[in-house]
Amino acid sequence: MRDKGILMVRFLIFVIGLLIMAFGLDLIIVAHFGATPWDVLHVGLFQHFGLTIGSWSIIIGFFVLGISAMLMKKWPKLGAYLNMLLVGIFMDGFMNLAFMITPESTIGKILMFIAGVVINGIGMGVYISAQMGAGPRDSFMLVLTNLTGWKIAHVRRLMEVLVLILGWLFGGPIYWGTIIFSISIGTIVGIALPKCQFLTDAILARLRNKNWKNDINRGASV
């Protein structure tokens, strides 16, 4: 029962992180200051073949997850599959919100874009800290980090640039913000993840300690 409660808290943190991350991604897209490299690819595929941006996020996620599984030589955790499905669903849901409108001024677009990048980075840190399994793209990032020994920031930048080139070939929306995201997201995640992990570990440790004290009190009363 105690382990089940901790698992539920981890899952809640995981879902909250995905919600935050998806919201940040949609802000970046709606700002029209340049989508993320992955969304450049998703939008380009959407423009060519239809479906929805969220649907292409799920499809590409399956493909990337398969590559990660082959490199790791083991099946990813359940959270990786949930990430792939939920982010696409959350993105489509947030896109229908009334305030998801592109600002008319350039300053407004820049501010919305910056907010999206920061929120996205924080969301990544929150959901990964739950250790329920990284999503397809982040799993691939972690696999390459382990294989190459490079820093996360360097691996992430390389991934973003390669995906950006592929998205450009499909005619996805590229602007200054896309380049800024490609360069900055690795650093943002590198800062956010340790802090989120510390906070999540502290919450779980407090929960375990509380359960332990309750067990002692029940034992003393018997």
Image: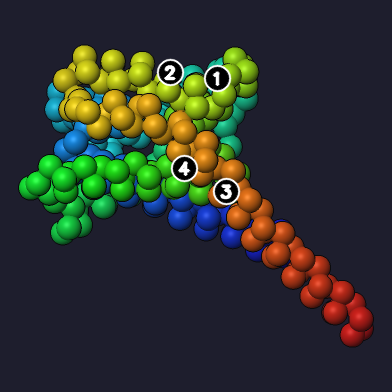
**In front of the other: 194 or 166:** 194
Q: Quadrant of residue 62?
A: top left
Tell me which residue sits at (25%, 42%) in the image.
Answer: 113
Q: Tell me which amino acid carries mark 3.
A: Lys
Q: Which mark is residue 144?
A: 1
Q: Which residue is mark 4?
A: 124
Secondary structure beneath dot 2 equals: helix
Q: Earlier in the sequence, mark 4 or mark 1?
A: 4
In this picture, residue 50 sits left or right of residue 196: left
Whether pointer 3 and pointer 4 mark residues with C-beta atoms closer than 8 Å, the reply is no
Q: Which mark is residue 54?
A: none
Q: Tell me which amino acid carries mark 2.
A: Leu
Q: Which mark is residue 195?
A: 3
Q: What is the x, y in percent for residue 154?
A: 49, 21
CA neighbours of label 1 inside 10 A, class few (<14), some (14 to 19), many (20+) = many
Tell me which residue sits at (54%, 27%) in the image.
Answer: 152
- Screen quadrant of the N terminus: bottom right
Whether pointer 2 and pointer 1 mark residues with C-beta atoms closer than 8 Å, the reply is yes
Secondary structure beneath dot 1 equals: helix
Q: Earlier in the sequence, mark 3 or mark 1?
A: 1
Secondary structure beneath dot 4 equals: helix
